[in-house]
Image (cartoon, coloured by chain):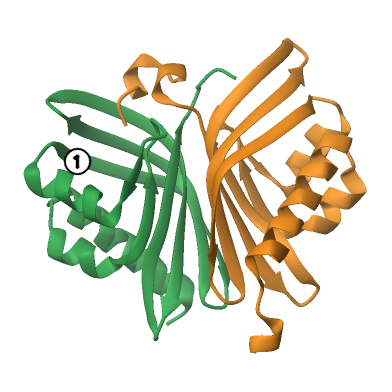
Amino acid sequence: MSAEKVLASLEEQRCAAMVAADCPVLSELFADDLVWTHSSAQVDTKANFLKALAAGSTRYLEIKRSDEKFRVHGDFAVITGLAEMHAVVNGSEKHLHNRYTCIWCRRNGAWKMIMWQSTAVGTPH
Amino acid sequence: MVDQAMSEAELIRLEDRCYQAMLAGDVAALRDIFADDAVYTHSNGVVDDKAAYLKAVSSGEFIYRTIERFEEKVSLLGDAAVVTGRIRLKVDFKSGSKLLESRFLSAWVRTAGGWRHLAWQSTPPASHAPAAAAAR
């Protein structure tokens, strides 16, 4: 299977696990040094991201991805796309329309997600 | 491969060269620095590929006046590297001059031709974002 196909499947797993708040699966997919930059510019570590999900303070109800593009360079991959997310954050409902850059790295034969960053579409300059 | 390993200082030098080319509006230098499949996501969520970004720089759609970086963190990943941090840019748009403050991600990759800039994304703090997208 091509790296792109593997990564596409991992991205599906990741989004499904986020909606299911399945922390063991996410913990497996995320590198320990994951850096997650939300569209608010708030930065989370892997531990903090999973803690918010486990506690239910962040709930992802739906994640739709489109315009997904893969740039694979050996053991390094940059994925970009448009994510429409329906989330509940600290009790407040959010409809997010974000451009994202997601980075995966192959370590000891296994792809791990090391970085996510999203930016709201239509944010005025 | 140890002798080819990228050091943090070398990566920062690559970054410096990139920002200098941005400030100079040096399209030829940026063409050389950017990977052919480079992707640039601006802080307003607009996505440019290499051709679109170079066109915007050459047409003066935005002119970088000052660029300051803070809290840079470098991750060295063999034939790739990622820098994250905060950035403050003064940019002239056709609509006027703006001071932009963002969190950024900057990814580099080693190609047959050397190290190239593969991806950039910047994200302004929530107070600058539309209300619907404010929290995360």
How far across and down, in percent of the image, does residue A74 sit? 57, 78
Q: Is residue B87 left or right of residue B127?
A: right
Letter of the chain shown green in the rendering: A
- Which amino acid type corresponds to the residue marked 1 in the rendered image? Tyr
The image quadrant of residue A17 is bottom left
The image quadrant of residue B133 is top left
Residue A116, relative to residue A109: is it above or below?
A: above
Q: At 29% across and 36% down in the image, what residue appears? A: A85
Relative to the observer, which residue lies in front, A13 or A43? A43
Q: At 78% across and 29% down in the image, what residue appears? A: B64
Quarter of the image where the N terminus of chain B is located? bottom right
How far across and down, in percent of the image, does residue A16 sit? 20, 55
Extreme-bottom residue of the structure: B1
Letter of the chain shown orange in the rendering: B
User: In the structure shown, which secondary structural element does the residue marked by tag 1 occupy?
Assistant: strand
Q: At 63% across and 39% down in the image, what residue appears? A: B69
Residue A68 seen in the current view: no
Disc 1 target residue: A60
